Image: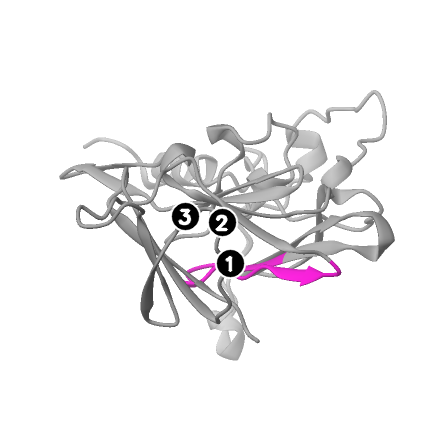
């Protein structure tokens, strides 16, 4: 009570960050006729006169993940942590693709599924995830393309070898493409034991087979029951 409309309007404009009108400026008249519905500017002040300009000591250079790219770079993108100069494979470099949390490092992509801690809390850890990489050495990663809902990370190696991950926000699948490289799937977890068998079992094209570390299997759909997270991870490989 007691606050004038002018004071309330000034407070709203400042909170919205659109500039601070000068007290000496006269409020423009409301247009008549068809132009009456046209919005009036909140301020006609030059932002350079209101806010102090910060001068950089040197021209900013994109990090190695964005090396070779020019033009505007998105800020506050969902994949932004993949290109920031934080320590790789740490929570600060997590990519919240959702429903998975990803970490991109030299030669591999770590995939984690968040787990519930309580009514209002979730967490994730690389110890309960899986890693996709290649048998051959690869360097990277680099961001080759992006849009509002996707980002493409690529790892390169000798003899034109490459591993690419076209990440799509909200997708229940994580896809990795290999060029002249052999896929490799590893996990800090162990397979769930089979109490009635010597070796734990995995599923290959719907058939349960022992995983003894020596026998090779061919197929297009693999399922791995992991003990620590009590989860089942599935791998689809087109023939």
Q: Which SS class for mark 1? A: loop
Query: Where is residue 160 shown, x and y percent of the image?
Result: 83, 56
Query: Where is residue 50 shown, x and y percent of the image?
Result: 64, 30
- Disc 2: which residue: 214
| Magenta-tinted stretch | 165-180
As displayed, is residue 117 above or below residue 71? above
Task: Report if residue 169 lies within the magenta region.
Answer: yes
> Which residue is more in the foreground, 217 or 126?
217
> Which residue is more in the foreground, 124 or 98?
124
Q: Residues within 10 Å of mark 1 (few under 14, many from 20)?
A: few
Residue 109 lies in quadrant: top right
- Disc 1: which residue: 216
Q: Is residue 24 left or right of residue 7?
A: right
- CB under 8 Å between callouts 3 and 1? no
Residue 67 lies in quadrant: top right
As displayed, is residue 81 above or below residue 32? above
Task: Report if residue 78 lies within the magenta region.
Answer: no
């Amino acid at each position: 009570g007691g606050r004038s409309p002018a004071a309330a309007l000034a407070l709203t404009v400042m909170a919205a960050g659109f500039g601070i009108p000068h007290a000496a400026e006269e409020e423009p008249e409301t247009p008549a006729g068809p132009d009456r519905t046209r919005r009036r500017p909140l301020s006609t002040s030059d932002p350079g006169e209101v806010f102090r300009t910060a001068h950089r000591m040197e021209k900013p250079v994109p990090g190695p993940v964005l090396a070779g790219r020019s033009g505007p770079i998105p800020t506050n993108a969902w994949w932004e942590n993949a290109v920031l100069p934080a320590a790789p494979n740490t929570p600060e470099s997590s990519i919240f693709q959702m429903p998975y949390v990803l970490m991109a490092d030299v030669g591999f992509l770590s995939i984690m599924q968040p787990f519930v801690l309580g009514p209002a809390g979730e967490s994730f850890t690389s110890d309960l995830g899986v890693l996709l990489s290649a048998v051959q050495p690869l360097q990277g990663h680099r961001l080759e393309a992006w849009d509002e809902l996707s980002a493409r990370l690529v790892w390169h190696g000798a003899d034109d070898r490459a591993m690419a991950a076209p990440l799509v926000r909200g997708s229940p699948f994580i896809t990795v493409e290999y060029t002249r490289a052999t896929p490799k799937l590893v996990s800090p977890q162990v397979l769930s034991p089979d109490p009635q068998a010597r070796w734990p079992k995995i599923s290959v094209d719907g058939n349960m087979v022992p995983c003894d570390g020596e026998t090779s299997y061919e197929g297009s759909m693999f399922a791995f029951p992991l003990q620590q997270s009590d989860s089942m991870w599935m791998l689809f490989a087109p023939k």
